[in-house]
Amino acid sequence: MDLQTKIINRSANLSIIGLGYVGLPLMVAFAEAGFKVVGIDTDLQKVDSINRYESYIQDVPSDALLQNRDRLSATSTYDHLIDTDVVVICVPTPLNKSGEPDMSFILVAVDEIASRLHPEMLVVLESTTYPGTTEEVVLPKLTLSCKGTLEIGKQFHLAFSPERIDPGRTDWTLYSTPKVVGGITPECLQLAELFYHCVVEKVVPVSSPRTAETTKLFENAFRAVNIALVNELMVMCNLLGVDVWEVIEAARTKPFGFMTFYPGPGTGGHCIPVDPQYLAWKMQMLGYDARLVRLSMEINNSMPRYVFDRISKLLDGRGQVAHTSNIVMLGVSYKANIGDLRESPALELLRLFIQEGIDVAYHDPYVRELVIEGNHLHSISLTQENLQAADCVVIVTPHSAIDWDLVIENSKLIIDTRNATKDIDGQAKVIKL
């Protein structure tokens, strides 16, 4: 039976390498579609959790694992790839200490696949990466492993399809969000389209993996640039004595030529802080300076320090020396209503407070504990006593579960970096950033 037929009748064996925020939802989606799916991850805790049908990702309920227990399992070894028809790579792509792309996770996954490559196999890379990775890195490794005995587009297939997972979002799901796909050959693209149509409502084919890779980076560079613009607007409005939030609300009444973005204490997650760097790095390799992308990253990365300095000046101006103040931060995850800490600006803000010897605590209903600068912190209860004891309360992540009336009623001073308190009385004690 050929691979196309196996995909159509759901008899194709599927492996997903990397069981994080992208891999686990994808694993469950294909299991629900009727495929037998094996997840592969070197993190034994994730493997054990899946095999116990216990989800560690908020968007994936444990019931979804339990209901599909006959079609999904996890392992820390790659041996199952020998019998795999389709393998999807969803491994992390962080930056190294010098700010360059760390391709090590992709390279390990591809090497493991290459040593087990066989006829009628489809390989899809979903991990965000620089343009050219699929054609210049993945394809040569796969081709070399089979020593020319398997022809791309004939005996095996390769494609790139960027993930578009937005943790915590319910209006756009994995199924309803269009899926961009680029194949090495027309045959590769055709199979990848057929494969993703099993779990995605709309597939958007493009001419090459390089185009798909660039599309992903453009999407996130677009957001990074516009967030940097509105963050800089916030700084300028503070200097002008103008309410940046009022400016944004007025501007968004224009029915054309404007898209709303909001300022904050910095950007978080993988997409905005990391992905544009992949594009800038690739351009640097080609002798081009992606100035706007690079500048947007500089502005967004500077926001935690700006917020810290602003808080210090506000406290000093009220006769409360920042170094001896008691500060409570509300929210530490990178976005509202999830517990995701990846690249969260709150972590840098906490680090700055701790480095300056400031007494700081945090409350987050989604993050029970974390470690900063060797300090093990636990989320404190949101009580009248804890709020009243604080010299300053800083709103970093506007979780809807937080009782904002309680916060305003019992806080001496509130620094609101997200405009979370806009519809609540008691604004005299609120200073917005």
Image: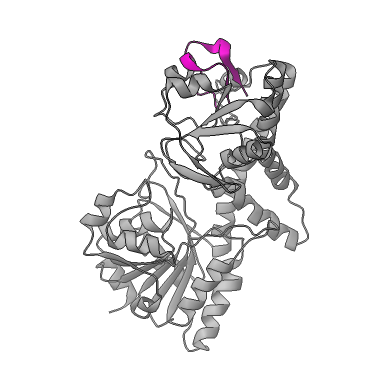
Residue 3 position by quadrant: bottom left
The residue shown at (67%, 42%) is 301
Nearest the eye: 72 or 428? 428
Nearest the eye: 4 or 281? 281
Can you give x and y, in whole percent of width and height, for residue 163 in the image?
A: 47, 54
Residue 414 on the magenta segment: yes
Q: Is residue 196 above or below residue 140?
A: above
Can you give x and y, in whole percent of width and height, for residue 363 in the image?
A: 47, 33
- Please say whether residue 423 is visible from this viewpoint: no
Can you give x and y, in whole percent of width and height, for residue 217 in the image?
A: 59, 52
Q: Is residue 77 above or below residue 307?
A: below
Q: How many marks?
A: 0
Boundaries of the magenta span: 409-433
The residue shown at (24%, 50%) is 63
Can you give x and y, in whole percent of width and height, for residue 95 in the image?
A: 62, 57
- Please say whether residue 65 is visible from this viewpoint: yes
Quadrant location, the N terminus:
bottom left
Nearest the eye: 330 or 244? 330
Q: Residue 172 vs residue 433: left or right?
A: left
